[in-house]
Amino acid sequence: MNAFTITTIALSLTFVHSFRSPPYHNNFPIAHQYHKHSNCRLHSTAERTTDTKSIITGNNVKYPTARGSEVDSRIIIDYKTKQQQQPTDDDDASSSTTSSSSPLLALRLSHILFASEELAKQSLEKLTKAEWNFEAMAKVVSNCKETREEGGGVGWVNLNEDFSSLLDNSSISSSSSSPSSSSETKKNPNQHLDLILPPLAREQILSTPTKPGDILLVESFRGVHLVQVVDVMVDVRKLSYVKAKRTIQEEKNPIIIQNEMEISPTGQDAKRKDSHGEGTKLAGVLGGALLEDNAQMVDLTYKIETMGCQMNSADSERIEGQLLSLGIRPLLDDETVEVVAPLSKRGVKQVKKQPDVIVLNTCSIRDHAEQKVYSYLGPHAKRKRSGEDVTIIVAGCVAQQEGQALLRRIPEIDLVMGPQFANRIADLLEDVANGNQVVATEASHIMEDSTKPRRQSKTCAWVNVIYGCNERCTYCIVPTTRGVEQSRPVESIVEEVKELVSQGFKEVTLLGQNIDAYGRDMIPKRKFSDLLRIVGDTPGLERLRFVTSHPRYMSLGVVDAVAETKSACEYFHIPFQSGSNNILKEMGRGHTRERFLQIVERVRHRLPDAAISADVIVGFPGETEQDFLDTLSIMEDVKFDNVNTAAYSPRPNTPAATWENQLSEEVKQDRLRRINELNLKHATERRARMMDRVVEVLVEERNVKVPTQVMGRTTHGYIVYLEGDIDELQGKLVNVKIDQCQRYYLVGKITDEVVTKV
């Protein structure tokens, strides 16, 4: 490769514009407004600079790109006064005197310095596959001592001298996350960068069209650099404003057109409109449901996609309940719509109807979580860019983790909200209906539901008893995304369970990220074992389950409570994560192998027939072959009914992601294969013991693959298929004699025989 030859690696997916994405400053919230329905202030968790005059937000501006096309960008909002700002005559005058016609002022960069091109390319491949994040890799492998400890952060690189004059008017902090404004910097804004990223290398980077998230490979006399574009800064004086469209609120609150940009006389946040200029259908529906005007109601549909754990499933039910309360209905799988065929074909044709509101409830536990979000939203973002009226919502843990960064990658998103806002989506959608982009990721107290969740099952229901997690496992991002522990009052939980029973639900699962910690944040403190007994005594409740237990906090009293409570199912999910005390210590789990086995021993003593499942991670940084063999040995000792296995993957903002003793993918995948083989062996053996036994099965739904069969579960949590009519059997407890035992399910027939006692 010739000196200073540069190759752009676009990590953003193909649905992102081929030109530079609309720029956003990293320091500021996308939307901020107090709501009449709550005391919560909605904004990004990013660091803020309160003295700054203006930020870039909205989507009613266009600016010329390096390729000559125009891109929807952001209109100006004053952060301090929360008002849209007009471009002044002074702005126009100053823009004509700039040294460059480009609105781009600076790029915020990070880099990793390598001794060889081969090593740089190998590392680039790992970044492209999301096997590492850029900051973690920089801290481990970068040869640049000036930036290594900071995760490769280079800072802001100025494109032209206008940047300094803008700083004079903006009072932007000189922190690492925003450009410097010192007098020394004005003379040579990039002087401090010359030894980190030499001038000729910077020149190549700055002359290449890029967008946040891109990674570039550059050579210099120092070696080979991987350079990541973290953020961009633009000069708002050089943006050409275009006339925005009218919204549904124009009769109530007329919009004044000034300098071809809409300014609200009441100082409302920036408005976003659809491409047709008549306000979105969402604004129409919410206008009637929330804004109390005379807006025409529109038939609006939604689709929600849920990733991850049971907590996310419960959150999705609450989100759906709120959407239904607003008059937005679920899109049916077989719904179609008529469209006019091209002139060459004539006539009309039926096509699958697309949802008006798309909700993606995300999970950040596993690797490639962020990439899955971008892949899923791609088609819907494309719909929006083509002019379709669609509202895009990203919820859950990735939303909490990424926050405003999601809007930089996918500007078409309307709402980004953390899991703590699942029961407040109606308030947030009011802002969206008003034309705002909203980022709601600030930590807050979990409020009780004001609307009813839309339960996905007619027989089994989730009930949250504790939110958040106070643990700090070194591999886990959950405490960052779910917040601190907050226990619900016993009375509130009992009332919800009673109402579920009155509605015909037969089974309830109590949910908590660390359910055994229930009550320790209360005054006076409560015990989870006591809650189990109280809820288990609810009249009419047939079955009671709970997840997820933590060996550090799970008391032997919980095992006793299950054994002594009639409705409690003989099933325990207790993640042990590793069988090696060395690795458990590095993970920060707070328990030992011996403590875990003590709990299992109590379960086997009090409930000999109980099912035990777990979670385990292999390939954790520093895990030796002996550590892995210790994990296999604990599986042999317990013989779990099922284990959820995973190869370790670095997660953002976790300590383990920055450690140098990372294992190779080959080692991790080999260990994952070996542990999966053992898990399959034990799961098959555990189900084989059910052969010819009579078990009680709660019938839940039809077998989608065999319409003549129904599906239910035993108290152990085993799936059972049997012949029957779902309309007749759904929600009923039936005795089933097992005649087939497969790896992960059983098959049987309804019988009059009594349940086999063990």
Image (spheres, grey):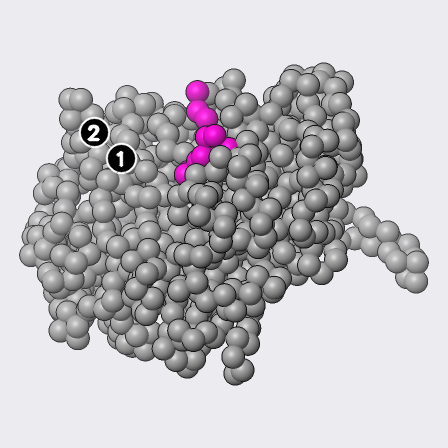
Front-lying residue, 671 or 392? 392
Q: Residue at x 28, y 21 (%)?
A: 491
Q: Residue at x 6, y 56 (%)?
A: 594
Relative height, residue 623 to residue 16 (above, below): below
Q: Residue at x 61, y 51 (%)?
A: 104
Front-lying residue, 625 or 501? 625
Alpha carbon distance from label 2 to label 1? 7 Å
Front-lying residue, 499 or 593? 593
Tags 2 and 1 touching, CB below 8 Å: yes
Q: Which residues are magenta?
A: 39-52
Relative height, residue 205 to residue 590 (above, below): below
Q: Main secondary structure of the magenta part?
A: loop
Q: Is residue 41 magenta?
A: yes
Q: Residue at x 75, y 34 (%)?
A: 244
Residue 524 is tagged as none
Q: Secondary structure at mark 2?
A: loop
Coordinates of residue 592 in the picture (x, y in percent): 10, 55
To which residue does mark 1 refer? 485
Q: Quadrant of residue 84?
A: top right
Coordinates of residue 558 in the picture (x, y in percent): 15, 40
Residue 521 is tagged as 2
Q: Amino acid at mark 1?
A: Glu
Coordinates of residue 131 in the picture (x, y in percent): 39, 67
Front-lying residue, 622 or 122? 122
Q: Amino acid at mark 2?
A: Asp
Earlier sequence position, callout 2 versus callout 1: 1
For mark 2, does the 10 Å Cα neighbourhood hold few (<14), some (14 to 19), or many (20 or more) residues? Answer: some
Coordinates of residue 375 in the picture (x, y in percent): 55, 58
530 sits left or right of 42 in the view: left
Q: Secondary structure at mark 1?
A: loop
